[in-house]
Image (spheres, rainbow, N blue to C red):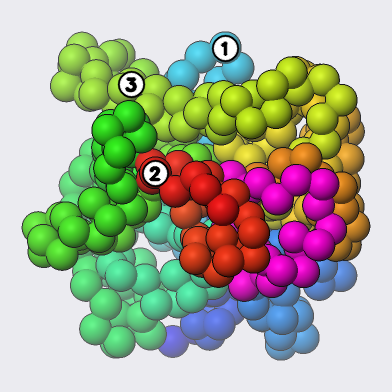
Amino acid sequence: MTVKVSVIGLGYLGATHAVAMVELGHDVIGIEPDQIKLESLRNGILPFHEPGLGSALTRAIASGRLKFSSSHNQESAAAEIHFICVGTPQKPGSAAADTSYVMAAAKDLAKWVSKTAVVAGKSTVPVGTAKLLRDSMSEIAGFNIHLAWNPEFLREGTALEDSLRPDRLVIGAWEEYSVERLKAVYKPILDLGTPFLALDVPTAELVKVAANAFLATKISFINAMAEVAEVSGGDAVALAKAIGYDERIGNKFLRTGIGFGGGCLPKDIRGFVARAEELGVGSAVEFLRHIDAINLRRRDKVVELAKVELGNLHGKRITMLGISFKPDSDDLRDSPALEISQRLTAAGATVTVHDPVSLDALSSRSPELNREGDLVEAMREADLTILGTEWKLYREADPHLLGSLVATKTVIDGRNVLDVPAWQKAGWKVIALGRSIVNG
């Protein structure tokens, strides 16, 4: 069954969701006030890097089922389901999430929404936000809005696949009507046997942020163990493998390195703590402050290692392999590799960055960093190499070839993904976080 859908906000989440809705057979109108972003999407060009999504966007436009507008109109008003997908960034100078964009989008939609339509929030928001939105929208519209919360679980690099074949679908609603209308939209996914949970609204609001807090905890846990391993002669990589066999623990997200970044995990755990404090239960999630601190200390560790290897960093040449917060993405938000590069530059080093897709975005973010699109040229004459993002290109690089280019064959493996014996055989000194591997 084809459903008329509007998607409000065409950033990473919204653009992906709009294309996914077309892939499921629905007619979609995307609302995006940013004219530059809007024109890019109209021309079938993604304003960000996401594998597979560009070709799906082209198909969606060619099908005639995906249209765009800078504002609501009679066509968007006719939508049966409205998905709110705008961002909730961290407030400047605060740990709390900024919900002003969500509130503005909801209030604007309230002037156009019909009495039978369902509004589904997908943005990650502090618990309690949905009720504020429903009350505000209902007051503007003059009738009770059917509002539900439908959290997203996208991972950058696999966003479209995650949208079409999610590991679960969650809908939080005050009424069965909203649940049934959304189940109709997601019928092709539910028909695949995808687990479905109909929850109360506050629980649905908590699902995404709670999941991210748990994943961040696993990452910081193994990095805390890495700190112990580094001073005791242990191997945190082997430790992670050993405890990961325990089915109660599992091996996913148990990888030592320079930690997590991006636009979700850091922001969400900080916002979670801020909201818990507002609710008077800040002590319940106080451990998340320590999780955040452990994560940031791994960046400190790399800077310290660079100083140990090179001494005074002034005039030293350092190559950073990868600058996005994760592979298959050009997202530089809270990127560990970017912060480390900036700090090394501030200490006097000349940092040259190589990344398969993120260099254009880097030019406006940190113009003080040298950018080099050719891996060989980026490596030439480096006094120190740091692997900051685990792109396949670096994991499979030939250490013999790279070793013939650099001034000093020393690499800090910030992600613990290199074939250490192969690199050592090629004469490299490998420094791996959380391990005692330091000699070539």
Quadrant in which residue 69 is drawn: bottom right
Is 127 positioned to the left or the right of 386 in the image?
A: left
Residue at (64% x, 24% y) in the render: 307
**Which of 241 and 252 lies nearest the eye of the viewer?**
241
Whether residue 391 is in magenta: the answer is yes
Q: What residue did someone put label 2 on?
A: 436
**Badge 3 amino acid:** Arg
Q: What's drawn in magenta, residue-wise?
A: 390-414
Q: What residue did someone put label 3 on?
A: 289
Q: Position of residue 120 (x, y in %)?
A: 42, 53
**Looking at the image, do the residues carrying marks 3 and 2 touch, with CB atoms under 8 Å apart?**
no
Q: Position of residue 4 (x, y in %)?
A: 55, 72
In the rendered image of this protein, does residue 218 appear above or below residue 289?
below
The dot on residue 93 is 1
**Which of 282 and 312 lies nearest the eye of the viewer?**
312
Disc 1 packing (10 Å; few <14; some 14–19; many ≥20): few
**Badge 1 amino acid:** Gly
Circle 1 SS class: loop
Nearer to us: label 2 or label 1: 2
Nearer to us: label 3 or label 2: 2
